[in-house]
């Protein structure tokens, strides 16, 4: 009788292993437009003093070179553009 339960347990485990890939389906793929977009940041540099940061990339939908002291300045709250 113990062999029957052991065999059933193995069969259940085998069935779970086969069913696992079906349960772990991939999420919805990103739209095709996402593959054609430029990266948000193309290049970045820190000044020799370490106080200034310059970033080249997409900022508010436009490719720009920005420099600033803080992230807020880089993304448009007072940075030079």
Image (tube, grey):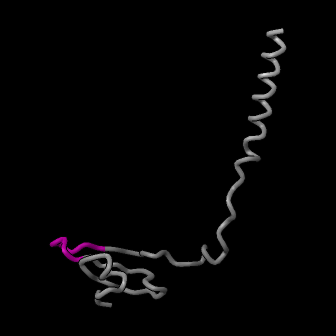
Relative to 11, does residue 80 appear above or below in the rendering?
below
Q: Residue furthest top?
A: 1
* Residue 46 in magenta stretch: yes
Res 56 → quadrant: bottom left
Counting the numbered discs, the total is 0
Q: Nearer the viewer, residue 37 or 30?
A: 30
Q: Residue furthest bottom?
A: 81
Q: Residue at x 82, y 21 (%)?
A: 8
Q: Position of residue 40 (x, y in %)?
A: 46, 76
Left or right of 78: which side holds 48?
Answer: left
Q: Which residues are magenta?
A: 45-52
Q: Nearer the viewer, residue 72 or 51?
A: 72
Relative to 64, does residue 21 appear above or below in the rendering?
above
Res 20 → quadrant: top right
Q: Residue at x 22, y 77 (%)?
A: 52
Q: Position of residue 19 (x, y in %)?
A: 78, 40
Most common SS among magenta residues:
loop
Q: Which of the image's four quarters has the C terminus?
A: bottom left
Q: Nearer the viewer, residue 12 or 60?
A: 12
Relative to 54, does residue 11 appear above or below in the rendering?
above
* Residue 48 in magenta stretch: yes
Left or right of 49: which side holds 44?
Answer: right
Q: Position of residue 31 (x, y in %)?
A: 66, 73
Q: Residue at x 81, y 11 (%)?
A: 3
Q: Residue at x 33, y 74 (%)?
A: 44
Q: Position of residue 1 (x, y in %)?
A: 84, 9
Relative to 58, does residue 28 appear above or below in the rendering?
above
């Amino acid at each position: 009788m113990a062999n029957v339960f052991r065999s059933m347990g193995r069969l259940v485990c085998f069935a779970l292993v086969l069913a696992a890939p079906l349960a772990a389906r991939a999420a919805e793929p990103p739209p095709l437009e996402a593959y054609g977009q430029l990266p948000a940041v193309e290049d970045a540099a820190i000044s020799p003093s370490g106080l200034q940061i310059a970033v080249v990339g997409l900022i508010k939908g436009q490719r720009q070179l920005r420099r600033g002291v803080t992230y807020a300045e880089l993304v448009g709250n007072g940075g030079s553009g």
